[in-house]
Structure formats: structure tokens, C-alpha cells
Image (cartoon, grey):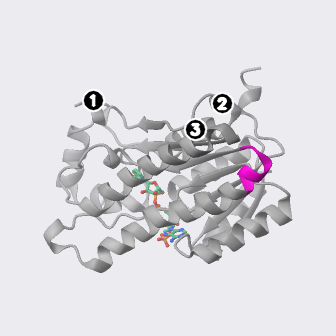
């Protein structure tokens, strides 16, 4: 009974920014659980390549190009997926950007807007568009990828724009959970620590001093891997978390303990 709750057979899942990193791991986790997965990413080739890897491994996947900052495109993608597959059960709002290590006083308007456009506006456009289809059928699970940076201020790299954007994701998660709680749509978030993906290469690979601080600040003394976030996303997307909505689940190696 308990393992069955983790199955997603017959369900349709959409993962934004699903072509690489955490998103690709989420797509694989949901696909392995039986969902038909739509991998959406900025670049069509990247989305398709990831979808093909899943298909080659026996899963049901499709890749599409989607820029989450374009609200009309997001609306059209949601309508198209619902029309083609008949339903949308899971949305993982994973697309996000972090061009970190920029001091607040040096942050340009463009730099600020870029992060807000993708990390905040993009998440809302997707929740709104895909959420409408979920509300219509009275069920669905949305998992937003927030960050421990929505709770703490990272050291040593300055990144006020990113931290503020992820705090907004967390509160948006709670706000939508409250609005949609009685209508069958659950909205939760995962708040990861540093995860080894292209996004964190600036610290892990290019700046050993910075990486040292990251590890010192983390009780577990290591960064995470994408699959360690995907397994939490899978849980939140499944019926195993049926009583959870509005939760921001930390997967941070203990970072926020100190
Ligand atoms: P990656 O940069 O490895 O992957 C993100 C993917 O999203 C890329 O394919 C990227 O394309 C795509 N993307 C960027 N902008 C858009 C857009 N406008 N529309 C659609 N897709 C887009 O990042 P991660 O896998 O590391 O991060 C995934 C999420 O997890 C993000 O929300 C991030 O903030 C969050 N997170 C990551 C942590 C980490 O340490 N890695 C820690 C905490 C949270 P492109 O490369 O072309 O920009």
C-alpha cells in the first residue's frame, strides 16, 4: 500500500528546466515512477535529448521548448499538453537562474530583472497556467524548487537578487497552497542546499576558496547530487504526501541548523 502511493502510472508530469541538472533528475524520477513526462527547457535540443534518454530507458517522455518567462507561451504549452494528453497531474517548477557573486551595490537593473523574471515571474506564470487545468479536474500536485537561500543568506558570495527570488518562491508556494487547498491542488516546495550542477560550477569548480566555505558551513560536509532532490520532488508529487500542502521541505545537508 505504501509503495503504491509513490507510483504515478497514468499521470502526466511537466518539468520546467528539465533538460539538465536537478530538472533532468526530477524528470527521470517521475518517469521511473510511471508518469508520462514532458521535459520543457529553453533549448528544444536539450529538452529533446533528455526526453530521448528517458525513452531509451523505457520511460514515456517528450521534450518541448519553453521559456517560462513568456507567459503567453506558458499558457499555450499548458493548453497544448492538456489537449494532447488529456490531463496534467504534476508540475515541477524547476527552471531557475543564479548568476551569483554580484554585490548589491553593483547589481544592474537587468541583472535583478533577469533573476526575478525566471525565478519568480516564471514560477507564477507556470503555476497559473498549469494550475488552471488542475483546478478544472480537481486534482494536481505542484512542486516548486525553492532554495535554502530563501531562508538563509549564503556565504561568501553576495547574491541578494537570488536569495530574494527564492524567498518569494517559498511564500508564493504557501499562498497558492492556501488558495487551492480545498480544490484538490497541492503546492509544495523543496529547498535544496548546493547541488552539483552547471549552476554551481562557479563555486565548486572555479573557486576552491569559496567551495571550502560552502563545505565548512554544511554539517554533512558535502554538497548534494541532483537525484537527492529528485527523490524529494517525487515524494511531494505523489500520493505519499497527500496531507502536505504549503510545505517548504529543506534538503540541505543540515546547512540551516547553524
Ligand atoms: P541548471 O542551470 O543546471 O539547470 C536549469 C535549467 O533551466 C537549464 O537547462 C536552463 O537553461 C533552464 N532555464 C533557464 N532559464 C529558463 C527559462 N526561462 N525557461 C525554461 N528553462 C530555463 O540549474 P540547477 O539544476 O542547478 O537548478 C535547478 C533549480 O534548482 C533552479 O531553480 C535553482 O535555482 C534551484 N536550486 C539549485 C541549487 C544548486 O545548488 N544547483 C540549490 C538550490 C536551488 P540554460 O542553461 O540555457 O539557462
Q: Pick whichever of labels 2 and 3 is earlier in the sequence.
A: 3
Q: How many marks?
A: 3
Q: Residue at x 14, y 70 (%)?
A: 105
Distance between the alpha carbons at the discs numbered 2 and 3: 16 Å
Asked whether, in this view, residue 54 is left or right of residue 15, the answer is: right
Secondary structure category for the residue under label 3: helix
- State the image quarter where residue 127 is shown: bottom right
| Residue 111 pos. (x, y %) | 30, 75
Secondary structure category for the residue under label 1: helix
Residue that label 3 marks: 231
Q: Look at the image and tell me in which quarter the N terminus lies.
A: top right
Q: Pick whichever of labels 3 and 1 is earlier in the sequence.
A: 3
Q: Crowding at label 3, few (<14), some or many (≥20) Cα neighbours within 10 Å? A: some
- State the image quarter where residue 141 is shown: top right
Secondary structure category for the residue under label 2: loop
Marking on residue 242: 2
Q: Crowding at label 2, few (<14), some or many (≥20) Cα neighbours within 10 Å? A: some
Residue that label 1 marks: 257
Marking on residue 34: none
* Relative vertical location of residue 18 with respect to residue 90 in this rendering, above or below: below
Q: Residue at x 29, y 36 (%)?
A: 255
Residue 18 in view here: no
- State the image quarter where residue 102 is shown: bottom left
Q: Look at the image and tell me in which quarter the C terminus lies.
A: top left
| Residue 45 pos. (x, y %) | 64, 75
Residue 40 in view here: yes
* Relative vertical location of residue 34 with respect to residue 1 in this rendering, above or below: below
Q: Crowding at label 1, few (<14), some or many (≥20) Cα neighbours within 10 Å? A: few
Residue 19 among those drawn in magenta: no
| Residue 104 pos. (x, y %) | 17, 66
Amino acid at each position: 500500500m505504501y509503495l503504491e502511493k509513490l507510483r504515478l502510472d497514468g499521470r502526466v508530469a511537466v518539468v520546467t528546466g528539465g533538460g539538465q541538472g536537478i530538472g533532468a533528475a526530477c524528470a527521470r524520477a517521475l518517469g521511473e515512477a510511471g508518469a508520462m513526462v514532458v521535459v520543457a527547457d529553453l533549448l528544444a535540443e536539450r529538452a529533446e535529448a533528455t526526453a530521448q534518454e528517458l525513452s531509451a530507458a523505457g520511460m514515456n517522455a517528450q521534450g518541448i521548448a519553453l521559456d517560462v518567462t513568456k507567459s503567453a507561451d506558458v499558457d499555450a504549452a499548458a493548453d497544448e499538453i492538456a489537449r494532447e494528453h488529456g490531463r496534467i497531474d504534476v508540475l515541477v517548477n524547476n527552471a531557475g537562474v543564479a548568476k551569483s557573486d554580484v554585490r548589491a551595490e553593483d547589481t544592474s537593473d537587468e541583472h535583478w530583472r533577469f533573476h526575478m523574471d525566471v525565478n519568480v515571474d516564471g514560477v507564477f506564470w507556470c503555476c497559473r497556467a498549469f494550475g488552471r487545468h488542475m483546478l478544472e479536474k480537481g486534482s494536481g500536485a505542484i512542486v516548486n524548487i525553492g532554495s535554502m537561500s530563501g531562508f538563509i543568506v549564503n556565504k561568501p558570495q553576495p547574491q541578494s537578487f537570488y536569495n530574494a527570488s527564492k524567498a518569494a518562491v517559498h511564500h508564493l508556494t504557501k499562498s497558492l497552497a492556501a488558495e487551492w487547498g480545498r480544490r484538490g491542488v497541492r503546492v509544495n516546495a523543496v529547498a535544496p542546499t548546493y547541488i552539483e550542477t552547471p549552476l554551481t560550477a562557479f563555486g565548486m569548480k572555479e573557486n576552491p576558496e569559496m567551495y571550502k566555505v560552502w563545505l565548512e558551513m554544511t554539517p554533512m560536509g558535502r554538497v548534494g547530487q541532483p537525484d537527492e532532490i529528485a527523490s524529494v520532488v517525487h515524494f511531494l508529487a505523489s500520493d505519499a504526501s497527500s496531507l502536505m500542502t504549503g510545505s517548504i521541505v529543506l534538503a540541505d545537508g543540515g546547512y540551516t541548523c547553524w
